[in-house]
Image (cartoon, grey):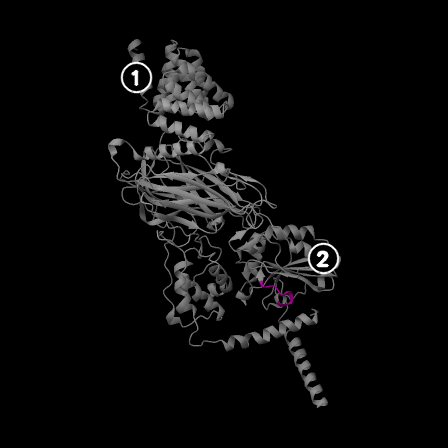
């Protein structure tokens, strides 16, 4: 050996003395042991994730596992980095709280300081038992991502979306969803979004390939608000919906799994599965997701340490608050939501003093929280865009605005609420909630295109067409070249019996997006209503090329051809429409009419 | 008095030397075939970089691409070794891990922590950089990517390993000779 002599001596001395130190501290009366004092905490609060096949990077199932990470465990429980649980304790309790008590933390710290002794075998509690495989038993339907995503070995956090095309032939009611995100060690969290209109498919380069992106938006055709927070994070136990609640899935619905992945240092194959558990009982209680947000206020100057953003929404109906899901990106610092009841009582709904995007989660309340009509729900988020925030994506800091990229910022709060104490005769209380929220957003940001658009859609769904048109017009005025806005305004004008006025907006929509199925369809409709059947046929044919499986387009194309006297062509399209959907009413009726005209 | 003190000193020195000789083989690092290897002998005067890893440490894993990038970049100027200090690790498991991460660097096991002590490292991943005279000029983290075990910066802002290799090659000294890393304690596997 030819190491420098000084250091060799250092090494020898430390190895000579180490056993002596250990001997001195051996088993005094107050010595804590793994078997008696620490194993109960580890088995309860660590082993669920720290075991083979689960999310944590190493197992903590027995003394030798825990001993190998003893000082590391001391560090992470002291800082409360583990178990991962961001909210501070509060009056309104959450279900499945992972927070360790101060006593538990002290016990672990003392045990490590005392040398991490094993203790007497008789003191060891029984090893925790875990359900292998699907936690709730074999699901009624298991879907596996068609193609895996290869997570690159390096780089920052990655967001990947998998589309699951549901193979169901009829409407199903789901009481539980288990997300198996593939190799759980690399999946930080995952979220399922229900895509009833295939809005996400156009983002795939080929069917089944999936697509990248941290935040995804899903457009919907009708009033069908999201109702469930389908969320997975390490250690999640699948949530079984309470009595009367279930998630509706129709034939043709897509589920989009949004995953947050963290590179491991080597390439990883990520191919998630989801398991669906059905119930025969359709939902009788219909919750919805309320979103408070204020992204437009996010214009955070570089260096700003405490940039406060708020939003206050007054509930128009009584609700039971079931769950809460705060969301910000890397500048988020202090995240709170509180409720001010009509009598002035304030209740903290959630308080996260040190936000960490990596451990974002849906928090369900142990008991539903009744919030009466007139309650103000307030979001108060502060952001740190200084160099003192080590998670700052920019070094040195830059001005940061709201947006979908991980380097943009977000200010969202989702609340799962169930309207209660309402009179069903006044219509769906969720509509009142959604309209109030849309109105609130327009008042908050009068120059926000989306706010006007959403309020327009809501008013249209509630049958208030004139008010809807005014909102769509406001939206189009804000973004004269927006495809979605022009299409919505055009469609509303058609619905209101003003097809001549609709045409220019629908043409504007197509100028912005030539392959916009809805706009071709609506323009075909508007032209047909003005008896310009040849032009209508053109539009329907283009729409059909974009969505060859759409029975309504086939039926309308047939009708326009029939109006032009091209009965043989019309018949083919009616028959096609009925192949796609045997109940297609226009095709059925017109085919009958053709038979009467020309009985053969 | 004088003679007595002198003789005691001699005896003490003798004891140390005896122990030193007795442990010389037991305290050497081993390659994956079990042969004793001295990473300094092969360096022929170049700086030596020892990179300490634990197979069960996720932070060690995430640093693999960083370590490979730096070791490729500095291949001419320093000699790099991966060092696995967990004495319960067997060579096959280490071999598999090294292959999984695609490492192209020579690998040492350090079951007796000879290199750990020499390098003064405490955490995985940490590195020790020795200059051409085998003087330890830096021990500690690779860079400041990780803030703690649950938070990492989007990208590191301080690059201690690169700075240390540059200093070793230029035979200059560093302002910070030791900066502790974030990861898994080596003492937990003693």
Circle 1 packing at 10 Å, graded few (<14), some (14-19), many (20+), is: few
Foreground residue, A551 or A282? A282
Foreground residue, B127 or A419? A419
Circle 2 packing at 10 Å, graded few (<14), some (14-19), many (20+), is: some
| Whether marks 1 and 2 lie on the same chain | no
Residue at mark 1:
A589
Residue at mark 2:
B167
Q: Residue at x 36, y 59 (%)?
A: A129
Residue that protrudes farthest toward the front in the picture: A344
Q: Which of the 4 image quarters holds residue A118? A: bottom left
Residue A25 in the image: x percent, y percent?
49, 76
Residue A246 in the image: x percent, y percent?
31, 40
Foreground residue, A6 or A466? A466
Residue stretch in magenta: B117-122
Asked if marks 1 and 2 touch (Cβ < 8 Å), the reply is no
Foreground residue, A471 or A116? A471
């Amino acid at each position: 050996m030819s190491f420098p002599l000084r250091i060799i001596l250092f090494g020898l001395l430390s190895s000579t003395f180490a056993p002596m130190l250990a001997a001195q501290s051996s088993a005094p009366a107050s010595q804590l042991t793994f078997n008696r004092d620490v194993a109960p905490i580890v088995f309860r609060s660590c082993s669920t994730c720290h075991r083979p096949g689960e999310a944590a990077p190493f197992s903590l199932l027995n003394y030798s596992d825990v001993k190998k990470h003893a000082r590391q465990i001391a560090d992470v429980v002291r800082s409360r980095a583990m178990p991962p649980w961001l909210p501070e304790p509060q009056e309104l309790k959450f279900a499945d709280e992972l927070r360790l008590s101060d006593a538990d933390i002290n016990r672990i710290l003392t045990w490590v300081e005392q040398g991490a002794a094993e203790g007497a075998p008789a003191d060891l509690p029984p090893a925790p038992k875990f359900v292998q495989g699907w936690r709730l038993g074999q699901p009624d339907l298991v879907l596996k991502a068609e193609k895996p995503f290869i997570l690159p070995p390096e780089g920052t956090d990655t967001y990947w979306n998998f589309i699951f095309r549901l193979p169901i032939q009829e409407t199903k009611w789901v009481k539980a969803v288990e997300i198996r995100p593939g190799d759980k060690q690399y999946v930080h969290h995952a979220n399922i979004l229900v895509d009833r209109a295939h809005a996400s498919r156009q983002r795939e380069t080929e069917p089944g390939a999936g697509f990248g992106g941290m935040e995804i938006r899903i457009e919907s055709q009708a009033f069908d608000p999201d109702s469930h927070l389908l969320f997975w994070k390490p250690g999640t136990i699948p949530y079984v919906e309470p009595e009367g609640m279930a998630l509706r899935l129709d034939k043709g619905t897509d589920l989009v799994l949004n995953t947050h992945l963290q590179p491991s240092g080597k390439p990883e194959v990520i191919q998630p599965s989801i398991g669906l558990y059905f119930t025969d009982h359709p939902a009788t209680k219909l919750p919805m997701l309320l979103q408070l947000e204020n992204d437009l206020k996010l214009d955070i100057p570089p260096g700003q340490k405490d940039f406060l953003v708020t939003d206050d929404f007054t509930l128009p109906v009584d609700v039971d608050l079931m769950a809460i899901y705060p969301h910000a990106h890397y500048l988020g610092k202090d995240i709170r939501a509180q409720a001010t009841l009509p009598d002035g009582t304030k209740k903290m709904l959630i308080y996260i003093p040190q936000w960490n995007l990596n451990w974002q989660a849906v928090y369900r309340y142990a008991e539903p929280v009744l919030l009466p009509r007139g309650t103000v729900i307030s979001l108060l988020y502060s952001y740190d865009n200084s160099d003192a925030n080590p998670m700052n994506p920019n070094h040195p800091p830059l001005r940061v605005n709201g947006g979908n990229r991980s380097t943009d910022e977000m200010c969202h709060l989702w609340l799962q609420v169930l309207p209660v104490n309402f009179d069903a005769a006044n219509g769906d209380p969720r509509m009142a909630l959604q309209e109030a929220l849309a109105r609130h957003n327009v008042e908050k940001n009068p120059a926000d295109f989306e706010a006007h658009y959403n309020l327009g859609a809501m008013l249209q769904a509630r049958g208030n067409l004139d008010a809807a048109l005014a909102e769509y017009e406001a939206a189009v005025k804000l973004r004269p070249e927006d495809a979605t806005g022009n299409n919505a305004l055009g469609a509303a004008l058609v619905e209101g019996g003003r097809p001549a006025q609709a045409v220019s907006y629908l043409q504007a929509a197509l100028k912005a997006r030539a392959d916009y199925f809805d706009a071709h369809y609506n323009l075909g409709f508007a032209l047909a209503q003005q008896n310009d059947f040849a032009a209508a046929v053109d539009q329907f044919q283009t729409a059909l090329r974009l969505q060859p499986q759409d029975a309504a387009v086939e039926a309308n194309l047939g009708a326009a051809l029939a109006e032009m006297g091209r009965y043989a062509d019309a018949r083919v399209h009616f028959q096609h429409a009925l192949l796609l959907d045997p109940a297609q009413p226009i095709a059925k009726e017109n085919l009958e009419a053709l038979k009467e005209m020309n009985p053969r | 008095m004088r003679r007595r003190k002198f003789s005691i000193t001699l005896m003490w020195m003798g004891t140390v030397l005896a122990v030193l000789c007795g442990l010389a083989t037991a305290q050497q690092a081993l390659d994956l075939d079990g042969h004793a290897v001295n990473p300094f002998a092969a360096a022929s005067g170049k700086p030596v970089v020892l990179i300490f890893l634990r197979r069960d440490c996720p932070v060690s894993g995430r640093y693999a691409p960083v370590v490979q990038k730096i070791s490729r970049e500095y291949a001419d100027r320093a000699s790099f070794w991966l060092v696995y200090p967990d004495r319960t690790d067997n060579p096959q498991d280490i071999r598999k891990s090294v292959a999984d991460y695609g490492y192209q660097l020579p690998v040492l096991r350090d079951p007796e922590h000879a290199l750990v002590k020499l390098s003064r490292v405490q955490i995985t991943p940490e590195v020790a950089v020795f200059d051409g005279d085998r003087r330890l000029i830096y021990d500690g983290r690779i860079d400041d990517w990780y803030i703690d075990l649950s938070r990492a910066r989007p990208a590191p802002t301080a690059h201690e390993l690169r700075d240390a290799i540059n200093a070793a090659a230029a035979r200059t000294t560093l302002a910070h000779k030791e900066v502790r890393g974030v990861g898994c304690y080596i003492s937990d596997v003693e």
